[in-house]
Image (tube, rainbow, N blue to C red):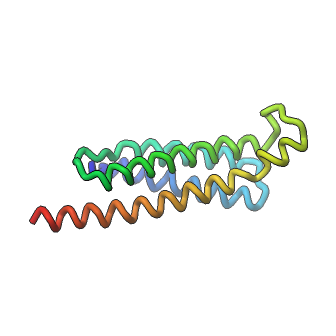
């Protein structure tokens, strides 16, 4: 895996911190929460996409695809967070409640679980590859 520079690592951490602050603020019904979460998600996804794997280990390639799917879900959660703040999608009230209202939480949870699983497994696979290379 391509290692991030110190600046890129700091941006990745800043993005993660902004996502945590934005989702936490949303629990306290703060109207600015989506405006903090979305830039954090963009930073986090952008820095994570800069980490590339150029090897030919099939397991790590599959896990990278899971990470990319998780990144897409983080961005979808940000979009749903904005939709939750106001019905800008033009849906009827019952449809809005059924399909949009607070569903960003479910999407964020799925993304976080996928992220945790894939990150842990990639670290283990890279360690196993390093042992086999010796």
The quadrant in which residue 39 appears is: top right
Query: Closest to the observer: 88 or 61?
Result: 61
Q: Residue furthest top?
A: 90
Q: Is residue 35 left or right of residue 61?
A: right
Q: Residue furthest right?
A: 93
Query: Closest to the observer: 53 or 81?
Result: 53
Q: Position of residue 13 (x, y in %)?
A: 45, 56
The quadrant in which residue 59 appears is: bottom left
Q: Position of residue 115 (x, y in %)?
A: 48, 58
Residue depicted at 54% across the width and 59% down the height: 112
Residue depicted at 9% across the width and 66% down the height: 134
Residue depicted at 24% across the width and 44% down the height: 54
Query: Closest to the observer: 122 or 38?
Result: 122
Residue depicted at 69% across the width and 51% down the height: 104
Q: Is residue 8 left or right of residue 96?
A: left
Q: How many marks?
A: 0
Q: Is residue 25 left or right of residue 101?
A: left
Q: Position of residue 62 (x, y in %)?
A: 37, 51
Q: Is residue 51 above or below residue 25?
A: above
Q: Residue furthest left?
A: 134
Q: Position of residue 101 (x, y in %)?
A: 79, 49
């Amino acid at each position: 895996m391509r290692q991030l520079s110190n600046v890129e690592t700091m941006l990745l951490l800043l993005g993660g911190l902004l996502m945590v602050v934005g989702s936490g603020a949303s629990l306290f019904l703060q109207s600015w929460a989506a405006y903090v979460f979305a830039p954090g998600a963009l930073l986090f996804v952008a820095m994570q996409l800069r980490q590339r794997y150029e090897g030919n280990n099939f397991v790590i390639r599959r896990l990278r695809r899971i990470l990319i799917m998780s990144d897409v879900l983080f961005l979808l959660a940000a979009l749903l967070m904005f939709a939750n703040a106001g019905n800008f999608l033009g849906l009827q009230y019952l449809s809005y409640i059924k399909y949009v209202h607070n569903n960003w939480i479910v999407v964020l949870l799925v993304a976080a679980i996928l992220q945790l699983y894939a990150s842990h497994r990639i670290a283990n696979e890279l360690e196993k590859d390093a042992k086999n290379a010796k």
